[in-house]
Amino acid sequence: MDGGVGNQRRIRDDYGRRCRDQGDQLGYLPIRKHVIKEILMTTVKIINLAPHSIVVYGCTPPIGDPPGTWTLEPSGTLARAIEKVSPAPSLSGIPLTEVSYIGYSGVPDPENGVYYVVSSLAAQAAYMHGRSYADLLVPGQQIRDKKGRIVGCGSLRYWSPQ
């Protein structure tokens, strides 16, 4: 093939088979990058540093089971903002505390081709303490069930301090 749409379809189909064979818990997901008016399919590694599964809705088939969803299982490493909690004066008899974020834990150093899913708070703490945020993703657009419980997200977002 000429490397056009047919080749992209073959790469996507090969990826779908690999996901079904190896399991989505490996954290591989195709990311499309725009390069001079052409969309190229690149495989990157996405690692979930949250304590729970992340379900992303609206994925391009053949990703997911059922198609259109992708579940990223926890890696076992937790990204956390480290808190310092101090007492504060009460408010009409209600106890209050002040919290400041004095560091972060569980976020590895950046690695080429690897992205980490973290909470917005963990991303903010890492950024505030000098870590690059270009590889940090956070769940976006919460998807809720009929009872209002979060069941997934509509995308993963690049985290940014702006």
Image (cartoon, rainbow, N blue to C red):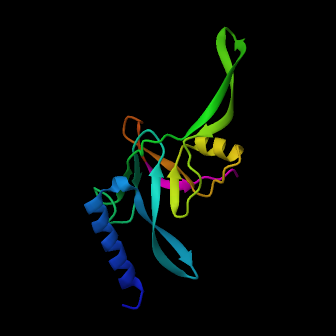
> Please, is residue 7 above or below residue 69 in the view?
below
**Which of the 4 image quarters holds residue 106?**
top right
The residue under the point 52% across, 52% down is 116
Q: Is residue 111 magenta?
A: no
Main SS, magenta region, reads strand
Q: Position of residue 39 (x, y in %)?
A: 49, 77
Q: Quadrant of residue 124?
A: top right
Q: Residue furthest left?
A: 21
Q: Nearer the viewer, residue 140 or 49?
A: 49
Tell me where residue 147 appears, x and y as whole percent: 38, 34
Q: Which residues are magenta?
A: 153-162
Near-viewer residue (101 or 89): 101
- How many marks are shown on the rendered structure? 0
Q: Residue furthest right?
A: 89
Q: Tell me the quarter of the image containing the N terminus.
A: bottom left
The image shows residue 98 at horizontal and vertical percentages of 70, 23
Outermost residue toward the top in this view: 93
Residue displayed at 67% across by 50% down: 131
Q: Residue 78's x, y, as percent? A: 49, 40
Location of residue 82 by image quarter? top right
At 65% from the left and 13% from the top, the residue drawn is 95
Tell me: 66 left or right of 126: left
Q: Residue at x 31, y 62 (%)?
A: 19
Relative depth, front residue between 59 and 98: 98
